[in-house]
Image (spheres, grey):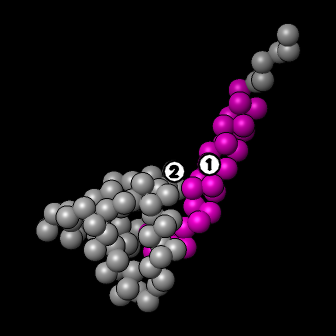
């Protein structure tokens, strides 16, 4: 039976795992951190004002207003659990995606 890794080795392995997990989650996301934050903030305001109708209409509006391609962003957000506007707010914020 081998000796258990010391505390710094465990911390290093945990940090490597977290970095790999973040990289895997964001690999298909065609938005950088600032864009994602802006998108989520925009959608959050509209969901708070108008509610969620279980579509991505507010998200799609932001994407279109910024001249970005809708399909890759919609696909990436779905991978992160953003299937409607309120889920974009809850599951796709910078903290949820980037840790």
Q: Nearer the viewer, residue 79 or 45?
A: 79
Instruction: Quote the CA–CA distance across marks 2 and 1.
Output: 9 Å
Regarding mark 2 in the picture, which secondary structure is present there? loop
Q: Residue furthest right?
A: 2
Identify residue for label 1.
Answer: 21
Q: Residue at x 47, y 84 (%)?
A: 68
The count of marks equals 2
Q: Residue at x 71, y 26 (%)?
A: 7
Q: Quadrant of residue 57?
A: bottom left
**Residue range highlighted in magenta:** 7-36
Picture quarter with the N terminus: top right
Would residue 41 be seen by someone viewing this image from the given angle? no
Tell me which label, 2 or 1, sits earlier in the chain.
Answer: 1
Callout 2: few (<14), some (14-19), or many (20+) C-alpha neighbours within 10 Å? few
Does residue 64 lie above or below 25 as drawn?
Answer: below
Q: Quadrant of residue 38?
A: bottom left
Identify residue for label 2.
Answer: 99
Q: Residue at x 63, y 55 (%)?
A: 24
Could you tell me residue 14's position as x and y percent? Answer: 66, 37
What label sits on residue 47 in the rendered view?
none
Q: State yes or no: residue 13 in magenta.
A: yes
Regarding mark 1 in the picture, which secondary structure is present there? helix
Does residue 16 lie above or below 80 as drawn?
Answer: above
Q: State yes or no: residue 38 in magenta.
A: no
Does residue 51 lie above or below 59 as drawn?
Answer: above
Could you tell me residue 63's position as x and y percent? Answer: 39, 80
Q: Are marks 2 and 1 in contact (CB under 8 Å)?
A: yes
Q: Residue at x 20, y 64 (%)?
A: 53
Question: What's the magenta bit mostly, secondary-structure-wise?
Answer: helix
């Amino acid at each position: 039976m081998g000796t258990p890794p010391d505390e710094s080795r465990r911390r290093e392995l945990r940090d490597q795992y977290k970095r790999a997990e973040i990289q895997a989650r964001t690999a298909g996301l065609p938005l950088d951190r600032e864009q994602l934050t802006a998108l989520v903030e925009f959608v959050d305001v509209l969901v708070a004002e108008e509610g969620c109708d279980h579509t991505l209409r507010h998200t799609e509006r932001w994407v279109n207003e910024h001249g970005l391609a809708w399909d890759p962003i919609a696909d990436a957000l779905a991978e992160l659990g953003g299937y409607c506007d309120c889920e974009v707010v809850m599951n796709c914020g910078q903290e949820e995606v980037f840790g």
